[in-house]
């Protein structure tokens, strides 16, 4: 269901009106909280833009403007979140990043925000991360879960190399691989194909997935 704020934001995006979009969000946030903004507004708006882009109602440039507006919002409001100063980390550490060649950071940033809010220590490696770098970092900090984000099919395929690096180093039992991003929503069977141990389609559910995978890690040794 498309809400009034979603319709109004899409209108601002279609006019490339970045200040107008932020003004709209300012007003909306006076009555709603930051987490609701991420889950009920910004995520669905980007998905709608993607659908309109695919249907050729919107261009690549529109998608770019939409991403810039969401980045503006994340920069501006992250500090207003009740979780801006996360409680001292009580869970983890875990590693997160976008796979090699993938330059869609927004979903990953949302996952990081929600995990930190639940007390996870997250090493966020950013976009375009080499498969070996995920595993290097996990070994360095003792992470039992690696989370990899990919938005498009061709980049999701690169996740297989993270799985291979984990297995090659004999870490298959001690590290679990979480995967996520738009392409996994469209093609759930891809999770197994790339060697993933689990996924969720919403950042809000990432905490539960990471808890399960953290508990699973090492169980096969016993
Ligand atoms: C914005 C956008 C762009 C921007 C990105 C800039 C930026 N700073 O973000 C720009 C315009 C640059 C761009 C470029 C491209 N894009 Co683009 N893009 C999008 C769009 C509209 C939104 C992506 C997004 O941010 N989604 C919003 C977030 C909140 O959703 P999400 O990422 O799915 O994340 C949620 C969950 O999946 C989950 N999650 C995410 N990561 C993880 C990780 C883990 C471990 C877990 C557990 C969960 C999890 O939690 C998140 C929050 O709830 C999507 C449309 C769509 N449906 O998503 C297309 C889309 C992903 N892009 C697409 C394409 C094709 C491209 C290009 C190849 C286009 C081109 N011809 O150049 C390039 C590739 C660039 C690259 N190498 O990565 C296609 C992919 C199609 C496919 N089947 O593979 C899509 C689906 C559009 C479409 N419908 O055709 N894109």
Image (spheres, helix red, strand yellow):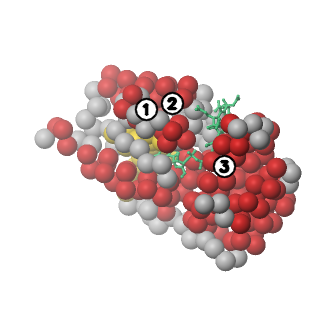
Q: Residue at left 79%, top 52%?
A: 13
From the viewer's perspective, is the residue at label 3 or at label 2 nearer? 3
The percent coordinates of residue 220 (x first, y second) are 18, 38
Circle 3 packing at 10 Å, graded few (<14), some (14-19), many (20+), is: some
Secondary structure, mark 1, is: helix
Circles 1 and 2: CB atoms closer than 8 Å? yes
**Position of residue 10 in the picture relative to residue 191 (left or right):** right
Percent across and percent down for residue 158 are: 49, 25
Q: CA distance from mark 1 to mark 2?
A: 8 Å
Quarter assignment of residue 208: bottom left
Pick the residue in front: 106 or 93.
106
The relative height of residue 19 versus residue 94 in the rendered view (above or below) is below
Q: Which residue is mark 2?
A: 156
- Residue at (84% x, 61% y) in the render: 20
Up the image or down, 98 lies above or below 33; here it is above
Give the residue number, with chain letter if any, for mark 1.
190
Closer to viewer: mark 3 or mark 1: 3
Q: Which mark is residue 48?
A: 3
Q: Residue at horizontal 41%, vertical 29%?
A: 194
> Which mark's residue is nearer the viewer, 1 or 2?
1
70 and 201: which is toward the camera? 201
Which residue occupies 34% across, 38% down?
Answer: 197
Tell me if the residue at label 2 has its CB under 8 Å from ligand 1.
yes
């Amino acid at each position: 269901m498309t809400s009034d704020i979603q319709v109004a934001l899409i209108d601002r995006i279609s006019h490339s009106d970045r200040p107008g979009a932020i003004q709209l969000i300012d007003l909306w946030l006076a009555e709603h909280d930051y987490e609701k903004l991420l889950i009920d507004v910004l995520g669905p708006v980007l998905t709608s833009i993607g659908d309109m882009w695919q249907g050729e109602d919107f261009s690549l440039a529109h998608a770019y403007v939409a991403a810039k507006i969401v980045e503006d919002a994340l920069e501006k409001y992250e500090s207003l979140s009740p979780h801006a100063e996360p409680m001292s980390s009580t869970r983890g550490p875990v590693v997160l990043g976008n796979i090699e060649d993938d330059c869609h950071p927004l979903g990953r940033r949302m996952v990081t925000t929600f995990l930190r809010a639940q007390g996870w220590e997250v090493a966020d490696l950013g976009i375009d991360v080499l498969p070996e770098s995920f595993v290097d970092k996990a070994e360095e900090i003792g992470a039992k879960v690696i989370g990899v984000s990919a938005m498009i099919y061709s980049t999701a395929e690169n996740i297989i190399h993270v799985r291979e690096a984990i297995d090659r180093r004999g870490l298959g039992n001690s590290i679990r691989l979480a995967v996520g991003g738009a392409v996994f929503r469209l093609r759930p069977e891809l999770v197994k194909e790339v060697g993933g141990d689990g996924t969720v389609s919403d950042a809000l559910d990432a905490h539960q997935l990471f808890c399960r995978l953290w508990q699973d890690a090492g169980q096969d040794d016993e």
